[in-house]
Image (spheres, helix red, strand yellow):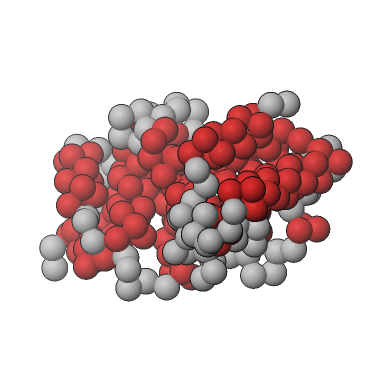
Amino acid sequence: MHPYLSGKELSVCGGWLMSDTQTVAFAITSEKDRPYLPFLDAAADACRDADSQFQRLPLAMQARGYMTIVQKGNGLDDSEKRRLLTIAQRAAREYVEGAGYDVHFPESAESTLQSLLVKYAWTETLSPDDWYLPDRIGSPQVIRAMALALNQYWTPEAAGVTDASADSVAKARAQFGVQLMRMRSEGRQAGLQSQTSASLRRALKAFQSGDIRTSETKDLPGLPQSLFDSLTKLLSVS
């Protein structure tokens, strides 16, 4: 079997492994390329404890390969995507640790990874009482839960797809903003104002982009850009 497909343990970190992991990672374009993942796993394991970031390059490629599978894996259920993202998150963290982001795993890739973690986070048992805790706030699970909560307040009237008057539309949109600020206030009362504001900015972005929508809002237009910008700015004020 070809070494790219076998997943056989690799005894050496270096040399051809650096270029070949890049070749394999960027050859992954869809779910059908999952057979390449064992090679990336073996390469990452071989280089996990390397001293230099360059020698840990297979970890960056492992993260990117797994992220692509999640992004393109329309046939995967959410639990499997969460499993793959957990592997990608570990690889990315270990690659940038102590050295920072670079061309192989830039901040844009980290942003994409965080968005995916939020999109597929498991929130079924997470109640609002669990959001405003030091060890929970800012987690993908809380951000997803916040975004799902925002969906409740974005009505067809607020979205401007009914025959409601301009005044009624404005009031419905204002109510969405009121609920967002209420959530921020609850975080402030818990002594977590900056963390809550940062989480709400990400939740609002996930809602606006359409990444996190309920069946009731998935076909509705998002916030007008001016309203989105204004709310994002308010959440940036300490």
Q: Quadrant of residue 235?
A: top right
Q: Is residue 41 visible?
A: no
**Residue 42 place in picture, x, y as percent:** 31, 55
Counting from the top left corner in percent of width and height, residue 20 is at 17, 45
Question: Which residue lies most toward the left here?
Answer: 2
Q: Position of residue 119 (x, y in %)?
A: 49, 57
Q: Residue at x 47, y 64 (%)?
A: 218
The foreground one among 228 and 20 is 228
Q: Give the side of residue 71 with respect to residue 136, left or right.
A: left
Q: Residue at x 52, y 47 (%)?
A: 223
Q: Is residue 79 above or below residue 99?
A: below
Q: Pick whichever, 33 or 56, lies toward us.
A: 33
Q: 93 or 238: which is nearer to us?
A: 238
Looking at the rendered image, the quarter that the C terminus falls into is: top right
In the figure, is residue 26 to the left or right of 119?
left
Q: Is residue 200 left or right of residue 36?
A: right
206 left or right of 186 in image = left
Quarter holding the N terminus is: bottom left
| x and y, in percent, of residue 186 in the image | 81, 46
Q: Residue at x 37, y 48 (%)?
A: 63
Name the image quarter holding residue 141: bottom right
Vertically, is 11 above or below 233? below
Residue occupying the far right of the picture: 189
Q: Quadrant of residue 92?
A: top left
Query: Does the image show residue 179?
Result: yes
Is residue 141 depicted above or below 205 in this figure? below
Residue at 54% in and 39% down? 228
